[in-house]
Amino acid sequence: MVFWVIVFYPPNAFIDSYSKFEELAFNAVWKLFMIMEDRDVVSWNSMMAWLLKVGQLSEARKLFDEMPEKVG
């Protein structure tokens, strides 16, 4: 028998939810990401996708350069 464990990580959910407001939530999403203690692969991918979505290409590139080689 296989059991699947779903881990709900609230900060990632908030990033995803806030990102739906696009530019209106820029400061809120960015601040939330910066204060997160444990950034995992989902956190980094969510931020990268959101920055690209709202046209913040230079910020996305900076974030990509700061991203650790291995997270998670």
Image: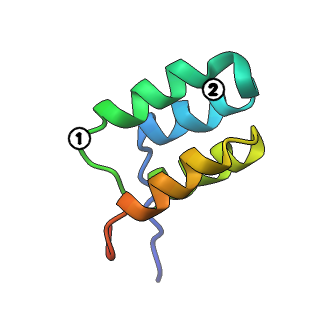
Counting other residues with Cα less than 10 Å from the Cα at mark 2, is it few (<14), some (14-19), or many (20 or more)? some
Question: What residue did someone put label 1 on?
Answer: 37
The C terminus is located in which quarter? Answer: bottom left
Q: Residue furthest bottom?
A: 1
Q: Residue furthest left?
A: 37
Please give the name of the residue rendered at 74% of the width and 30% of the height, measured from the top-left corner.
20
Give whichever of 7, 48 is nearer the camera. 48
State which quadrant residue 41 falls in: bottom left
Query: Which SS class for mark 1?
Result: loop
Above or below 52: residue 24: above
Residue 10: x, y in percent?
43, 35
Side of 61 where 65 appears, left or right: left
Amino acid carrying mark 2 in the image? Tyr
Please give the name of the residue rendered at 66% of the width and 52% of the height, measured from the top-left corner.
49
Q: Is residue 42 visible?
A: no
Side of 30 where 22 appears, left or right: right
Query: Which SS class for mark 2?
Result: helix
Residue 67: x, y in percent?
38, 62
Please give the name of the residue rendered at 67% of the width and 32% of the height, measured from the top-left corner.
19
Residue 14: x, y in percent?
53, 30
Please give the name of the residue rendered at 41% of the width and 25% of the height, measured from the top-left corner.
31
Marks 1 and 2, how far apart in space?
Answer: 18 Å
Q: Which mark is residue 18?
A: 2
Label total for image? 2
Residue 5: x, y in percent?
43, 62
Give whichever of 70, 27 is nearer the camera. 27
Q: Is residue 60 visible?
A: yes
